[in-house]
Amino acid sequence: MNAYLDYQAAKPVDPRVFDAMKPYFIEEFGNPSSLHLYGYNATKKLEESRQKIAEFINAPSPDNIIFTAGATESNNLAIIGGALRNKRKGNHIIISEIEHISILNIGKYLERQGFKVSRLSVDQYGRINLNKLERLINDKTILISISTASNEIGTLQPIEEIAEIAQKHKVWFHSDAVATQSSVPIDVQKVPFDLLTLSSNEIYGPRGIGALYLKKGVRVNPIIIGGGQEKGMRSGSENMPGIVGFAKAAEIMKAEINTEAARLKKLRDKLIEGILKIPKSYLNGHPEERTPHNANFRFDYIEGESLLLALKDENVEVATGSACSSKTLEPSHTLISCGLLHEEAHGSLLLTLGRFSEEKDVDKIIEVLPEVVRKLRVLSPLTPPKFLEQIKKEVN
Ligand code: PMP
C-alpha cells in the first residue's frame, strides 16, 4: 500500500458510512416529495439526517440546516445568496486573501455584479488581524466570510472574535468550516456564526453533498431555482444516498472527533519534528494554532512539483497546494499572502493526515524525504555552490 498523505484533497468514504448508504440506492429509492409510502419513508430519513447534521455542530434545530451539493455550492449559496438578500442594506463584503478558491472566485463574480469586495491580508502565519478587520467594516458592509482555518497551511482563525466583531456591527458572519470539520469540534451556539459551510467528504462521507447552516432568522436568496425543496433555498430532488451517508459520517465524527484529533496531532508532530531535521526546511503556517492533521513545509532551492513526483516514485502520495487549484502553475495564493517569495512558495509540500493514516506512513516519508530533497538540490540550478559541495559530500 502506498503511503497516502493528501487527506485534504480527498478522503475515502468510511465503510460504516457506505453500509448506511447502500439501501438508499435500491430498496429505499423514494423521493421525499412523493406522497406515497416510499416518499413518506424518504421524508422521514431526510429529516432524521438533517437532525444528525444539526447535532454535529450543536445547532439548536434541524431547521437550521439546508442540504447542498457540496462545500462549493454552500459557499455560493451563503455569499451570493446572502449578498442578494441584503443588497438593499449595502453592497460591501469582506473576505480574507487566503480563502478557498471558490470564495475568491465568488468575490470576483460579485464585483462584476456591482458589489464591493475587500480582501483582508494575513500575517506570516496566515492569521487575520482583528483590528484590520474592524477597520474595513463600513455602513455598507453586509457580510464577512472568513474560513475557520486554511485548508492549505492549517492555520486556525480567531473565529470567536470575528463573530463578536460581526455581531457588534450587525454584519453577517459566514465561515467555510471544511478545513476544521474532521479535527476541531464546532459549536454554533458558542460561536455565533450566521452561516456555516459544511462538506460531507471532509468527514469521510461521500463527495457531492454538503450543507449550509443558517442561524435562526437568517435567510438567503436561492441560487438554484426550481421545485422549492429545502425551504425554497435549494431546489432539486434531494440526493438521498448522499444525505444518509453525510448524516452517518457526522454521527461517527461527533463521537470520535476528540480521540481522532489527539491521535492525528501526535502523528502530525512526529512528522514536523522528523521533517524539520532536513537542512533549510521550514514549516508553513502557524506553529501552534493549526489544525491537528496538517503539516505544510517548504525547502530551499527545490520545487514542490518535483518533490511530489520524486515521492510518488517512492510510493508516497503528497500534495503541493490546494488540490482545487493545483493543476495551475501559479504558486499558492495563500503562501504568497503570508509573504513568501514566488520561488519559496513553489518549494512547498502539503502533508495531511486522516482517519486511516498510520504511524508507518509518517515513518516512511521521514525515512525517504531527506534523500529525495538532497538529490533534487544536487540537480537544482538554484542551489548555491557552497551548499552544493556540502550536500554532495553527504552521499560519500
Ligand atoms: N472549501 C474548502 C476549504 C475546501 O478545502 C474545499 C475542497 N475540499 C471546498 C471548499 C470545496 O469543496 P467541494 O469541492 O466538495 O465543493
Image (tube, rainbow, N blue to C red):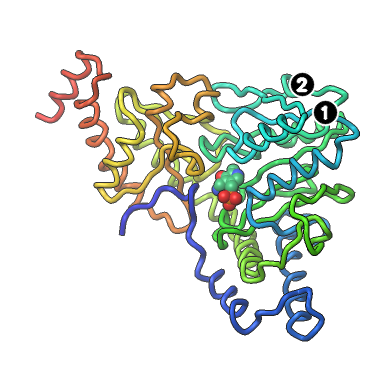
Q: Are marks 2 and 1 in contact (CB under 8 Å)?
A: yes
Residue 183 in view of the camera: no
Q: Position of residue 87 (x, y in %)?
A: 86, 35
Amino acid carrying mark 1 in the image: Thr
Taking the image as shown, residue 177 lies to the left or right of residue 341, namely right
In this rendering, would 169 be left or right of 122? right
Residue drawn at x 29%, y 46% is 312
Quarter of the figure with the N terminus: bottom left
Taking the image as shown, residue 187 lies to the left or right of residue 18, namely right
Q: Classify residue 382 by image quadrant.
A: top left
Quadrant of the image occupied by residue 368: top left
Q: Who's the residue at 49% across and 56% down the image? A: 11
Q: Nearer the viewer, residue 295 or 235?
A: 235
Judging by the rendered image, the residue that carries numbered circle 1 is 141
Task: Give the answer, above or below, for where 374 lies relative to 51.
Answer: above
Q: Residue at x 61, y 24 (%)?
A: 122
Residue 14 or residue 261, whichever sits in front: 14
The correct choice, above or below, for 268 with respect to 204 in the image is: above
Q: Tell me the kind of residue under disc 2.
A: Leu
Mark 2 or mark 1: whose residue is earlier in sequence: 2
Residue shown at the point (68%, 23%) measured from the top left:
129
Measured from the top left, where is residue 263 in percent x and y? 49, 51
Q: For the residue labelled by badge 1, is the local secondary structure a helix, a strand or a loop?
A: strand
Q: Which residue is mark 2?
A: 136
Position of 279 relative to 16 (above/below): above
Q: Does the Cβ of the disc 2 residue fall within 8 Å of ligand 1? A: no
Quadrant occupied by the C terminus: top left
Residue 297 percent location from the top left of the image: 41, 32
- Observer able to see residue 364: yes
How many residues crowd mark 1 within 10 Å: few (<14), some (14–19), many (20+)? Answer: many
338 up-or-down from 368: above or below? above
Query: Label for residue 295?
Result: none
